[in-house]
Image (cartoon, helix red, strand yellow):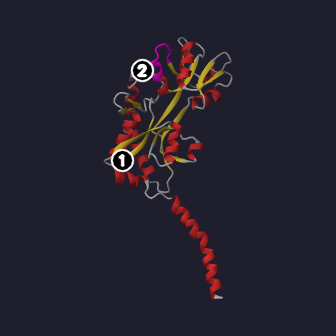
Amino acid sequence: MLSRRLFAAGAGAAPAILAGRARAASQPAEWTIDRISRTKVLRIAALPGEAPYFNKDIASGAWSGMCIEMAKDIAGVFDGEVQYLESTYGNSVLDLQANKIDLAFALNPTPKRALVIDFTHPFYLHGFGMVGAKGFHASNWAELDKPEVKIAVDIGSVHELAAHRFAPKATIIGLKARDDCILAVQSGRADCVILAVNLGLTAVKKNPALGEFQMLHQPRIQLPTCMGVRMEADKRWRDFLNAWVDYNRGIQQIREWLYAGLAINGVKPEDVPSDVEL
């Protein structure tokens, strides 16, 4: 009888033991914030050609831009340095999951992404507007929502989603990359291209043949831009970053980093339209 009771007790404990082993297997050997504190190295995804966030000097290999300065400031809290892994917006999510990086910058916290990584508080909200051909003007989505208006969008982007949602009657031309959209406007194939504020301002400065960047209203679209972090049971790393974001937004430091990033492509504060909020 005693042996049966012992067997039953052991059998009942087996699932709990297995569950405990599974949890132990999924738990990292060291939490992100502890590893950064120990090694003094912050690993981030760096995206070539994505000014004002990232810019890589071809000759020297040196990185600059808004998110580079943010990363250096975060690493400085730990008396550490920044280590760069060249990536893309989409791959940076995978890099986080694979524990190749500790931080991914400038991500929109979409519901699908939120299933696989965590996000910090937004470090700024970017609005949407359009860059038109010379002489083409529009201040709201209704002015674009006409069959005769040809809108260029990069396929799979939030620009494409916004165009289909708020100007469904327009002739929407889907192209592979943002540069293709800009060329479409320059060549007359499209009347305008939908772009986030920072991208639109940069495009106009780099391409004098384009018209001006104009914010689109009614509705005014503003999407949060966040940092992405790996999902961990220990939330100290994410909580630290949230405090860092709130503090640096409050003292307008993030705004200064953004203007400095825009300046990489020659965009000055006076180039920013009065109805643009940065």
Q: Position of residue 182 (x, y in %)?
A: 53, 20
Question: Looking at this view, is 271 or 7 the one in front?
Answer: 7
Q: Residue at x 63, y 88 (%)?
A: 2
Residue 261's place in the image compared with 21, above or below, is above
Q: Which residues are magenta?
A: 201-212
Q: Position of residue 32 (x, y in %)?
A: 43, 52
Question: Looking at this view, is 106 or 197 the one in front?
Answer: 106
Residue 195's place in the image compared with 110, above or below, is above
- Residue assigned mark 1: 41
Residue 2's place in the image compared with 129, above or below, is below
**In this rendering, which labeled residue sits more in front, label 2 or label 1?**
1
Image quarter hosting the C terminus: top left
Instruction: Please say whether residue 218 is one of the residues in the magenta stretch.
Output: no
Contact between labelled residues 1 and 2, with CB atoms less than 8 Å apart = no
Residue 87 falls left or right of residue 40: right
Image quarter hosting the N terminus: bottom right
- Residue assigned mark 2: 271
Q: Position of residue 107 (x, y in %)?
A: 50, 38
Dot 2 crowding, Cα within 10 Å, few <14, some 14–19, many 20+:
few
The image quarter containing residue 189 is top right
Tell me the amino acid under the disc marked 1: Val
